[in-house]
Amino acid sequence: MTVIPHWLNKQANLIPHHTAIEHEDGTVITFRSLQEKSQSFAKKLTNVGVKKGDHVGLLSTNELKLVIAIHALSYIGAVGVLLNTRLTPDELQYQVDDANISLIVTNDGLLPKARKLTLQKLETFLSVLEYEEQFVTLQEELQLDEVFTIMYTSGTTGFPKGVTHTYGNHWWSAIGSVLNLGLDKKDKWLATLPIFHIGGFSIYIKSVIYGMSVYLMEQFDTQKVHEAIMEKGITIASVVTVMVQRLLELVDEDGYPSDFRCMLLGGGPAPKPLLEKAKEKNVPVFQSYGLTETTSQIATLSATDALNKIGSAGKPLLPAQLKINQPDSDQVGEIYVKGPMVTTSYFNKVEDTKEKIQDGWLATGDLGYLDGEGFLYVVDRRKDLIISGGENIYPSEIESILSGMEQIKEVGVTGIENETWGQTPIAVIVPKATITKDEILAYAKERLAGYKVPKEIYFVESLPRNASNKLVRSELINYIK
Amino acid sequence: MTVIPHWLNKQANLIPHHTAIEHEDGTVITFRSLQEKSQSFAKKLTNVGVKKGDHVGLLSTNELKLVIAIHALSYIGAVGVLLNTRLTPDELQYQVDDANISLIVTNDGLLPKARKLTLQKLETFLSVLEYEEQFVTLQEELQLDEVFTIMYTSGTTGFPKGVTHTYGNHWWSAIGSVLNLGLDKKDKWLATLPIFHIGGFSIYIKSVIYGMSVYLMEQFDTQKVHEAIMEKGITIASVVTVMVQRLLELVDEDGYPSDFRCMLLGGGPAPKPLLEKAKEKNVPVFQSYGLTETTSQIATLSATDALNKIGSAGKPLLPAQLKINQPDSDQVGEIYVKGPMVTTSYFNKVEDTKEKIQDGWLATGDLGYLDGEGFLYVVDRRKDLIISGGENIYPSEIESILSGMEQIKEVGVTGIENETWGQTPIAVIVPKATITKDEILAYAKERLAGYKVPKEIYFVESLPRNASNKLVRSELINYIK
């Protein structure tokens, strides 16, 4: 059982006056101040009735108070259940009940939605601040095997499952990343991904482990993110594919400032034409691979290989192991991962845990292969695989090809039922210039085997994306009805 | 129980062609090559009869083969007992017996000394290489709670004790350091300290955890080290006080190249005049504090504070805690430390372990205090404390003052018995120019309280130093007889 001192206390002691968080509105908060606010919030939460081991739901868009509440829970030893703000009340209610949430703390904007839930207790960040601080002994140490957070992930089948993250999972994730990316005292990490997802959340944990500044943006706005990178001394930014697409349109030939080290790209395989465009514009994009269960990225393409292995998610980070289970003749199989950053359980789901995690190895549900040098290529979600006449078709491959057409802004591919072939692929397209279905099909036929060419092309105004801006292929079918 | 993949395998996979070790003779060995050589050596050692859990003594001055042997042991899961080459055969025999050593592997130079020992088995690096590789399953994972090394430390009383280091102790030590110093892909760490001490050993563990190059020097040679820092792209160097003293004499006003990040200074408190001289010459010296039991430094003065807190050993590293036990009216007391880099036991010494380590806190035997901002100042070894007429006198304070005299090269202070006062301090001095005892006493009287002024001054040609070049005050008395 490994014990470390509370990470925020350490930074408040080591570098009290260093910026912990710089909000896009100009507010700056030091590590000392973040400690004081978080400890104060913890004492107030205690007065609300929160105690060690309690499950507290956090329902909030990105803001400083959410970060403070998260650290406050760690001072109490309570577990934070990060709730996706875009869920419907019914979806939220399921998670509230499943996770034994005793209290939800929300921001004002989401109060109306929270009010629709059946809850033991509901507070807002502001209402908690009205309480008196209760005298309580705050945690001065973190036990790495204690659970800190629960985040829900939509399983391949059935209801969402609550992924538990221990303090150790968060710790090892941050350390795995720093050993890959390196660390500089002037690092400033741009955070615009939702904090309720691991990709956004993990930045704030890196901050207190590295002693690093975070640039907090309440939501993704292409112009604002671009300006921040150009003018605010940003060194690293966590992004998903669609953000890269939009940002690249704003980058001129001078590229980004030399202090900007990289975009860390998560949230699924990116189309190769996009990565090549980034290379042309000298924008360093490091593709990575990770899931909620791995407490953010578990494989990342390193700086050394970023330009030579375009399309790869790199190699597993130092503390991590990765293998392809039962590879087919093309070496493609399900990706299995192991390491101290990998979750040890789904909350309250003994059977699911046993099924997905065996001997420390997690079955990710993703398909991929390793090249001769051990670089990982993620092919697709196993559940998104289209099987047509016995052939495996990976939607991401078709999307990658079609996104190479200049007139196409975004594209999603999924399978529909077909009497002859079982399934056939269709493409749903957001055009950015005039284009015809025939032109698209002609382009596809030149570049794809016949059975991979979409049987139908649909034009839409936008694609279904989740709160992380990830394409939700299972919903494509609803967009074309 | 935390498990990580074997660190050398990881680097051999992640950055196979990156330099792991650059020997001062020009030999360069990549991580892939270091892996191959270490695995091969492991298979040969297996043929010699070494198996998981065995204790293997390593008796060698700094050389590549020693590093390979160390990694080889980790592939077998055997425990390396690092033997101090400067010990007498009797002293070595004690450790051989105490540590249950089944085999010693030595280099050719130390073979005559090793032959004087009563041993189950003796091999040299070269004789092991003559064996065939035995087929054996090498460890692909490291269990962080398994013991990897044993290093002997001279206790405050009685016989030396074998400090056990788990893989986890080494891991956390390396991580604590990187979170303080940062990490850059072009880092190259100069290693001239003996590998059989933790200060030298730990550099090679950092190497495989960070994926960092080490510049290996067989022994400390002022001119060669200076040239290496000037010409070999060194970014960090581990040093002890006497090395800094000698190096500063060679540094001209241009200082060291801009890529040189710091000298990491361990091995006990450094005289303040020396640190000020380093500051004048723009040589970044980061004082640190650590012992064998903490698996190298546990506190380090960070870059931010290096110039403002001269004389301080900084603050405890992120995963570490530090407190002063029972401070006196000057806030000075014994330093206690806690953290996952702190040893959990002295080998085969249940009582000593219980006495020194309680609830995870290690009593270091060192005296120190924290200033108002939490910076550690190490005052002295508790056993070196001189008590004179009820007053505490710290030899290091007197040494620090006297070393400010230009004519003094090195100085050591200890206490001798005195009928009136119990003890009184004496000073043993290595002059570098003509100087009289009266001049020294006059200088001391101006700067020290009367009871701290040495009662005797002795001139000698050199001071007693151990294998790490650390002053051994307990032997000063023998130098003046």
Image (cartoon, coloured by chain):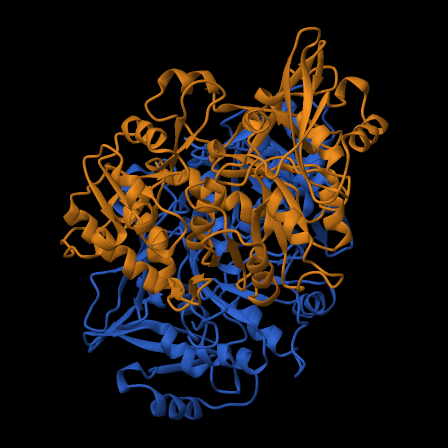
Chain colours: A orange, B blue
Up/down of B458 relative to B268, above or below: below
Position of residue B321 in the picture relative to residue B246 (left or right): left
Where does residue A302 sit, x and y in percent of width and height?
66, 45
Instruction: Name the residue: 26% across, 34% down.
Output: A117
Residue sitting farthest toward the top: A420
Q: Residue at x 74, y 44 (%)?
A: A433
Residue B407 seen in the figure = yes
Q: Is residue B44 left or right of residue B350?
A: right
Q: Quadrant of residue B6?
A: top right
Query: In percent of the image, x 72 and y 9: which residue is there?
Result: A389
Q: Residue at x 65, y 69 (%)?
A: B222
Residue A331 lies, with reference to residue A141, above or below; the image says above
| Residue in front for this viewpoint, B99 or A200 | A200
* Number of numbered markers: 0
Q: Residue A470 falls in which quadrant of the image? A: top right
Question: Against A304, is A430 above or below?
Answer: above
